[in-house]
Image (cartoon, grey):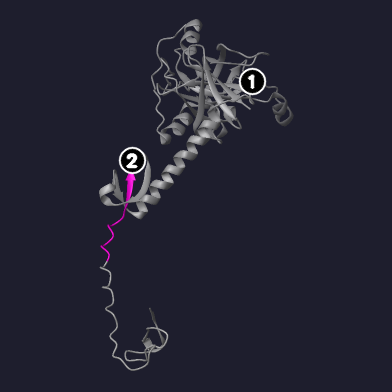
Amino acid sequence: MRWGLFGLRELGLFGLGFCGLTALGGCVAYSPPDLADPPAAASAEPPIAICYEPDQDVVSRVTPADCRGRVVTEEEAEALADARARRHRAQIIGDRQSRPDDKVEIRTAGSGFYINSQGQVLTGFHVVARCAAVTVSTITGGRTPAHVVVSDYGLDLAVLQTKARPKSFARFNPAPDRDRSLTGSVVGYPALGAATIVPSRTPVEAWPAQLTSGGTEFSVEGRIRAGHSGSPVLDQSGRVIGLIRSKVDAVTTYRETGQVVEDVAQAVTNETIFRFLAPQHVSHVTQARGPELSDDEILERASAFAARVECWN
């Protein structure tokens, strides 16, 4: 049955209106059938909330009763989603950087040293720049993956995070003697024509008072070689007084100044290292200079925290 023109029901072949012609003729009164009762009003939809489940680290829209975490606002949900995305990106980058695969090999290697018990290694920025992956090797802990957590191109410093928990780590001398030159040691993994797999000690003469590069570095004289970058410079008690940055280019220096410079390197000062570490909340330990140690004692103690930093490409 349909509604016809003017709102009247169409009843049949000749039926019209409420009193219309039937198929047999004549006029009859017509009462339209009762309309069905209108459907009952739908019950109100339960409210929907934005729920954050910290155990699963997910945000979803559910009823408050079904929320297994806590109800959050739209703004909080967006912030949580952004934070989750950042964590995932950081994890992907870290995994790529710390996991060598069959297509890469060690192309270059430098040095570094553990600075706390949390497995963090201090090294030079250029040692780990442009690496597809980074690993750290020690004579006591073998090889372990590492990734950069803090770095500064200008200061040429970087901190690596490893899963190692070293039994020993370096102590920094908070106030190296600046009144005179210091007899010291550099303990690291220099390249001596072949891969160096054990640390060695190189005797040096250091001048912490002769600051260069705007006060961030000082000069060190000794047989510093490729691979020494990132090594600690130690005083006679085995405390760190700086970090080897680079060897002075003798040819360029002579060309520009006319001076002959041999076996001179630049080291980053402790003060610069402290300023680099402090804002990043990277822990380190300072300890005043102690009693002098023999050369063998310095090498033995430093070998426990010295590390070979390997760049894979």
Q: Is residue 296 above or below residue 1?
A: above
63 or 131: nearer the viewer: 63
Q: Circle 2 sits in a helix, a strand or a loop, which is it?
A: loop
Q: Is residue 258 visible?
A: no
Question: What is the three-letter code of the residue carrying label 1?
Answer: Ala
Query: Looking at this rendering, what residue extends furthest in the right direction?
Result: 255
Q: Position of residue 262 (x, y in %)?
A: 67, 19
Mark 2 vs 1: CB contact within 8 A: no
Q: Is residue 47 found inside the magenta-colored segment of the image? A: yes
- x 32%, y 89%: residue: 18
Q: Is residue 47 above or below residue 68?
A: below
Q: Is residue 37 above or below residue 266?
A: below
Q: Position of residue 172 (x, y in %)?
A: 43, 21
- x 48%, y 35%: residue: 91
Majority secondary structure in the magenta region: loop
Task: Pick the quarter of the image with the C terminus.
Answer: top right
- x 33%, y 40%: residue: 54
296 or 75: nearer the viewer: 75
Residue 54 — which label? Answer: 2
Q: Is residue 188 above or below residue 146?
A: above
Label 2 – label 1 distance at C-alpha: 48 Å
For label 1, the residue is 226
Q: Circle 1 sits in a helix, a strand or a loop, which is it?
A: loop
Question: What is the three-letter code of the residue carrying label 2?
Answer: Pro
Q: Which residues are magenta?
A: 42-55
Task: Look at discs 2 and 1 and give the one toward the viewer.
Answer: 2
Query: Looking at this rendering, what residue extends furthest in the front direction?
Result: 24
